[in-house]
Amino acid sequence: MNFPELKLSQTERDFNFDFAILEHDLSYFFEKRCLDYALEHINRFNHKIKDNLYNVRPLILKEALISLTCDLASVSFYHYLNMITFVNLRKDILHYLTTTTLTNDDFMPLLESIVNNYFSNLDTLDIPIDGTRLSKQVALVVYYIDNHCDEPLRANTILEELTLDPEYTKRKFRKELGFTINFYIRHAKLQRAKQLLINTHLPIGEIAERINFYNSAEFARQFQKEFDITPSKYRELNQIFYKEE
């Protein structure tokens, strides 16, 4: 299949080149968890292109945001345990971008929102992760937990479902990641709660119920203990893409 060439003006070529450099830098800063540097580079980019931004077609701007969204998600696949969070985030952002009519005025606010949203979903488990080096058993357990956060989860039940040897897999999980399966279950549920706080209007009690936490009071206590912020305050500071359910 031949793909027809999209004709670009010189201004649009220059924009694509500058954005490609920014995209590379933002992916690097996302991997290194450097939000301040990411925002600084966005400001530099804005200063450089602002005089010609309105000479770039909205289609080109939208394609740039789509490319960045996919690049940031791909970084998560090899560096962060909660890659499913970013798969879902990518889905939501792409749906928004492809179903919304965007103008040139929308571009910079959306760029900043996408980057802030990815950083706000970074896992607080600040440990080096190389997804290519996790054993098959450990990767399978992590993947299962991340995909079933809304269900009641127990380590032994998960291992039975995956037909894995309980004692061997528990030891391997702790050796490779430094914490237990049950610890990660709680952590993954709280990470899922962050996503729901940002992307839905659900009351906090309903979020606790959805992720099968013990009760809303315990959920709020555990959330603040884990992230040093209350669920309501986290929502206030980070809610960007608001979805009606």
Image (cartoon, grey):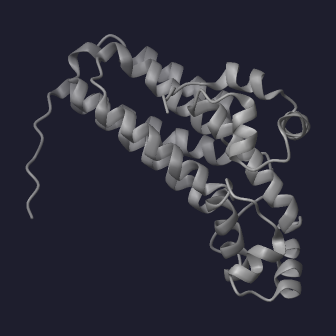
The answer to which image quadrant residue 143 occupies is bottom right
Is 55 left or right of 69, judged from the image as shown?
left
Decide which of 138, 47 is in the foreground and name it: 138
Q: Residue at x 78, y 75 (%)?
A: 157
Q: Position of residue 235 (x, y in %)?
A: 69, 25
Q: Residue at x 52, y 19 (%)?
A: 43
Q: Residue at x 46, y 35 (%)?
A: 22
Residue 18, placed above or below residue 215 = above
Q: Residue at x 66, y 75 (%)?
A: 140
Q: Position of residue 237 (x, y in %)?
A: 69, 20
Q: Position of residue 4 (x, y in %)?
A: 8, 50
The answer to which image quadrant residue 222 occupies is top right
Residue 206, placed above or below residue 105 = below
For the question of whether residue 16 can be seen, the reply is no
The answer to which image quadrant residue 227 occupies is top right
For the question of whether residue 195 can be seen, the reply is yes
Q: Position of residue 209 (x, y in %)?
A: 73, 43
Residue 130, placed above or below residue 149 = below
